[in-house]
Amino acid sequence: MTKAIFMLYRRPNMSGDEFRDYWRNTHGPIAAKMPGLKKYVQNQALMTEEGEPPVAGIAEVYFDTVKAMQDALASRRVRRPSPICQTSPMRRRPLPLSWTRWI
């Protein structure tokens, strides 16, 4: 199983609750339709007494192979997102690909 991890940052003009609602209810269902996707996990950061954390969330996407992931990330669906996501309140920063082994 191959996994990519993305750190997500909310736009400065959005509250944490607005970001979480958008990610869960708008972006999530679109991302879940990536071709070849086996698993999609949203790790949503929660506000603490200090306020909103600098990272709004971490997304994990899982594929059977590196090639399947590369094909999905290069697909028209991902490269040309819906008009909803073109004005997305999210900014993402990818982390290195990893191979996951459950023990």
Image: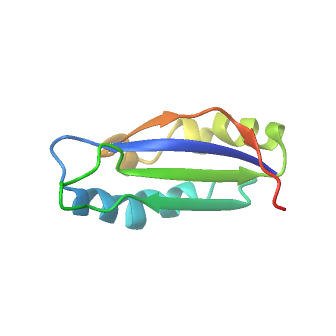
Is 64 on the left or on the right of 47, as rendered? right
Front-most of 54 and 73?
54
Q: Residue furthest left?
A: 13
Q: Position of residue 25 (x, y in %)?
A: 39, 67
Q: Position of residue 87 (x, y in %)?
A: 30, 42
Is 65 on the left or on the right of 82, as rendered? right
Front-most of 49 and 93?
49
Q: Is residue 98 visible?
A: yes
**Image position of 42 with respect to 67: above or below:** below
Q: Where is residue 15 in the image (x, y as percent from the top left)?
A: 18, 55
Residue at image coords 57%, 34%: 95
Front-most of 30 and 66?
66
Q: Quadrant of the C terminus?
A: bottom right
Is 72 on the left or on the right of 79, as rendered? right
Q: Is residue 35 visible?
A: no
Q: Residue furthest front?
A: 49
Residue at image coords 51%, 38%: 80
**Image position of 50 with respect to 13: above or below:** below
Q: Position of residue 71 (x, y in %)?
A: 75, 38
Coloring basis for residues: rainbow
Residue at image coords 71%, 53%: 62
Is 63 on the left or on the right of 93, as rendered? right
Residue at image coords 39%, 47%: 85
Labels in figure, total: 0
